[in-house]
Amino acid sequence: MSDIKKFMYVNRKAPYGTIYAWESLEVVLIGAAFEQEVSMAFVDDGVYQILKGQDTTEIGVKNFSPTYSALGDYDVNKIYVEKESLEERGLTVDDLLDLKYEDEDDDWAEKDSIKVVTSKELAEILEQQEVVLSF
Amino acid sequence: MSTLHTINKSPFDRASLQSCLRLAADGNAILLFEDGVYGAMKGSTVAELVEKALSNKTIYVLGPDMKARGVDESKLIDGIKVVDYKGFVELTVENDKVNAWV
Amino acid sequence: MKFGIQVNEGPYTHEASVSALNFVKAALEAGHEIFRVFFYHDGVNNGTRYTTPPQDDINIVNAWSELAEKHNIDLVVCVAAAQRRGIVDEGEQERNGKDGNNIAPGFRISGLGQLIEAGIQSERLVVFGD
């Protein structure tokens, strides 16, 4: 398994209503050990996964939103959020978790992992992928 | 690179078809199957969107799922091609990857 | 061509399992290789041998088992998803102190890495889900 492939995880579902978001994140974390070229996309209701301020205490299930902040440590730092999906939901990037990573090629400078892209840009990014895992 | 997109939801239930059409590159192939086949029918409120997409994308519909649901070929939007499971497999081979809009 | 298949939904509620079965059969008929079928989310419910549908209904679990035996296909049930949903093999039974197991013939329980590996090793990964 020496070859490196471009993997993209496409998230299109909201958290908590169904388990897909959480189990998808588990795949991303496990997948990080395989040292592939990984990126994530948040589209449609998937953008709700990375909304700030999630608190699940009163529904009694695990709040997994802090886990997204760990993605940078797993070298998952290409996180694309579709602009049109945000706008359709009345959201901006300020409503989202502040996801950061340390760039080892730039003296470990802290950088934003989230990049808001238009659907046209995301379509091009999707075209470049070799494996698309959708959740 | 070329992509085969698969859509298995009715466009009246979820917006998978609409999202796919927004994010699929020109020249890509789209397969409508399971409840996705309803998106291939003439005269609906999404038909115009699908007709527009046909100008730069190829759209297929899975015959076995159509038949199961009583959707006759005569009800399909002009230009949509019917394939069976053998054709589905061929589409995945012809394209470099599959993007499932689940 | 080498295919990896991911099944995200359980049998009967959703068509995904049947679609995946039909796809796998068609791919094998066309001479392709199925590297692995990976069952995730409620898809792990495809792997319980206690499934007993009415006689006039398709037995989806048996269909997978028969396919696995005939074509030597690797059917992998995700361990984390299986533990949540009570799909148990002998190893899991022992590890978690359960009073029995329910894994169907031809299936095995393993980690999520098996899905990533299927993505790397297969030339095409096809996902069936909700």
Image (cartoon, grey):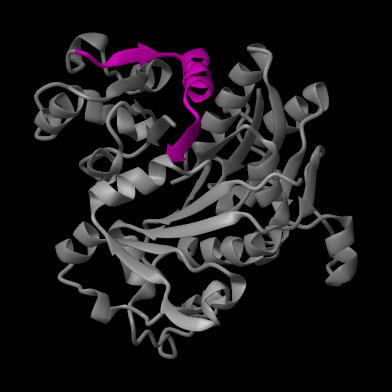
Q: Residue A7's x, y, as percent?
A: 54, 50
Q: Is residue B12 above or below residue A101?
A: above
Quadrant of the rendering where the N terminus of chain C is positioned: top right
Name the side, left or right, on which A94 lies relative to C57.
left
Which residues are drawn in magenta?
B79-102
| Residue B81 falls inside the magenta stretch | yes
Identify which residue is drawn at 37% across, 84% down. Answer: A54
Q: Residue furthest top?
A: B74
In the picture, residue A131 is in which quadrant? Answer: top right
**One can see residue C50 in this view:** no
| Residue B88 falls inside the magenta stretch | yes
Name the side, left or right, on which B88 lies relative to A17.
right
Q: Is residue A99 above or below residue C80?
A: below
Q: Residue C62's x, y, as percent?
A: 72, 32
Name the side, left or right, on which A95 lies relative to C27.
left
Compare residues C62 and B97 and report the one nearer the observer: B97
Q: Residue C13's x, y, as percent?
A: 48, 44
Q: Residue A9's x, y, as percent?
A: 48, 55
In the picture, residue B81 is in which quadrant? Answer: top left
Identify which residue is drawn at 74% across, 40% down. Answer: C75
Compare residues C121 and A127 and report the one nearer the observer: A127
Compare residues C47 and A97 and report the one nearer the observer: A97
Q: Is residue A11 above or below residue B23?
A: below
**One can see residue C64 in this view:** yes
